[in-house]
Amino acid sequence: MFEFNIKANNGLARAAVFHTPHGLVNTPVFAPVGTQATVKTVTPAQLSELGASLVLSNTYHLYLRPGDELIAKLGGLHEFMKWPHPILTDSGGYQVFSLAKTRKIDSEGVTFKSHIDGSTHRFTPEKSIQIQENLGADIIMAFDECADPNNPEYIRTAMERTHAWAERSLKAQSRQDQALFGIIQGGVNLDLRVESANFISSLPFAGIAIGGLSVGESKEDMHKVLDSINSHLPVNKPRYLMGVGTPEDLINGIARGVDIFDCVLPTRLARHHSAFSRHGRMNMMNATFASDTQPIDVDCQCYTCQTFTRAYIRHLVVAKEILAGTLLSIHNLHTLVELAKEIREMIYQGIFEENIPRLLEIWKFNANKQILK
Amino acid sequence: MFEFNIKANNGLARAAVFHTPHGLVNTPVFAPVGTQATVKTVTPAQLSELGASLVLSNTYHLYLRPGDELIAKLGGLHEFMKWPHPILTDSGGYQVFSLAKTRKIDSEGVTFKSHIDGSTHRFTPEKSIQIQENLGADIIMAFDECADPNNPEYIRTAMERTHAWAERSLKAQSRQDQALFGIIQGGVNLDLRVESANFISSLPFAGIAIGGLSVGESKEDMHKVLDSINSHLPVNKPRYLMGVGTPEDLINGIARGVDIFDCVLPTRLARHHSAFSRHGRMNMMNATFASDTQPIDVDCQCYTCQTFTRAYIRHLVVAKEILAGTLLSIHNLHTLVELAKEIREMIYQGIFEENIPRLLEIWKFNANKQILK
């Protein structure tokens, strides 16, 4: 049911077709994030039109509101949010550690207080799998502990707990129509990362997720982790780099063998009037754009760029119109979905590796080229 | 250029085709309001899909931000907001009186302070027409004074000023590709309303607007005003009831000979999680809807009702997701656009008058049937 067929390789990069109950996912792929069963400000029709194939949703949020049992009763997450294509849910682990008001970890699980109303809840590997089975996504995650990167001494403890929970997550799975991924932890300690990669790879997971990155470490450290684990991962399983996804990260991640990415950045930046583009990261509030009749990105085929001028989008931003967030979300999501597609096609043509420097030059705007025209 | 061809009559109601430079408007029609050159939370593509033909935008807002001269430089309002269909702009009069921080009226015009930054500006009939010519809408309004309904003694003064300004607005017009409407004032004083109807009708306007209603008076008073002026209006010019547009108001207005309506209510209610429907006005926050798999309105053909359940929309509302506002706006706007269309077809068939009691029974929810299932 979850065949992962690699069609082309180029260096460490792979282009593949991942089969799921709700359709094919061509990888490498960027998955928009629909935290609360909606990709913020965008309809499923717009999401489909901008080229999305796989959407991520968050177990922690949906468990708290509207509740996984209600979603199951209403026919599952695909039916609830009217996204008939593949969906991935995380395990709730990361959110519990980062969002819950207070939390207490023991070897069995985590007790935490809801960020919404302070009520007390408990997640265990078994509970996380049960919730994810209620939600019914195509791809689900083992319950893991994402260690505080500022506490290196604790990283081994968290990793070992993650390994024990990985085994319990596998045992807890009862549905056969969901691809369960194991999660590699280990912080930026390369020895621990290799140990974790070997352990998770030894278990019968349908795919491998790389957790605990993009949590404050340097890009260099992220790349070292990806480099160190690559040869320890099974070739024939999809690899998912959790919560990572600037244009630059996609290029660097795919070059290091990653197949699946997700990130809230495109929609979050959109709500803060920023646009990704081949011209740099653009702050659409900038007065430079007041009478600019070009689209955000002249080479972009999204609805926003095919329809509206920078001048109009700047007006919407300045006038605090919600439509600005929608139009910028459509553009930013399309940009990442399309970049993954562009790289995929380069892998098929065997020309991705030689194009990495050029792609990084175009898309390296996160550091220096902010707010360029 | 602005032919208004009445195709059918039924009682006082008329069905007509109004020709404008950007296409035909079939009347009776409901015009969504795009205050700041956007119908809030809705894209032009969605607006077109939900059936809108005529959109209103506000002179006061666009003059202040982004500026009418900038919009002219960028190709006019149609090009700026990418609405290639007919547009109507108001004169700015109503907004100056209701929104500006302070204002001082004299016989020449109004000096006021911007609600955005407190800067001082001045509108005269000539200035209002100049701004509206810069914006370039198909239908534009004479500059008028909407008198405070709580100050009946002042209503004659305001009406006479409105009449003088109507003549000056006509003289100020230089573009021939915009239909200039005169505005009838007079509060709820029926003698003044008849006097104003006679005066405005005697001038060479392309259409007649009825201003100063839906500003706090009773529905009964609104109906009396419409009844009193009907026989004093030219038959062969379009009639526009400004700022009025609940489902009930549409039925009652069309029955009294009105052709064009606009109102912010559908989008404003949407942002406050209320839906119009044949089941009553629905507060989508209501727990009743938590597991309700029906659409908002089972008889509605809009994208929202054809796609999503009440349960999902309630979830979006409770989770404070912006998409709730978009989906409810699409539904509420479609409902009014469609109701106008349904009545139009009844007029063509000669059965509107006999159906008024039935329509009012279905749609009379504004008063009593709030928050019904």
Image (cartoon, coloured by chain):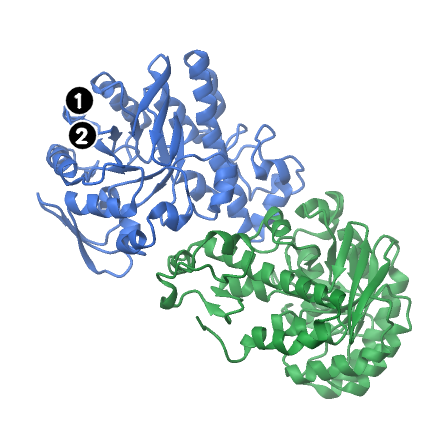
Chain colours: A green, B blue
> Left or right: where does residue A234 sit relative to residue A47?
right
Give percent across and percent down for residue A153: 74, 88
Query: Mark 1 — on which chain does it sit?
Result: B
Where on the picture, by quarter, is residue A123? Answer: bottom right
What amino acid type should be assigned to the residue bearing mark 1?
A: Val
- Residue at label 1? B194
- Quadrant including the C terminus of chain A: bottom left
Classify mark 2: residues with Cα within 10 Å, few (<14), some (14-19) or many (20+). many
Q: Are marks 1 and 2 in contact (CB under 8 Å)?
A: yes
Where on the picture, by quarter, is residue A173? Answer: bottom right
Query: Mark 2 — on which chain does it sit?
Result: B
What amino acid type should be assigned to the residue bearing mark 2?
A: Gly
Residue at the (52%, 46%) spot, across then down: B326
> Left or right: where does residue B28 sit relative to residue A204?
left
> Left or right: where does residue A143 sit relative to residue B335?
right
In the structure shown, which secondary structural element does the residue marked by tag 2 occupy? loop
Residue at the (61%, 46%) spot, across then down: A45
Residues A145 and B35: in front is B35
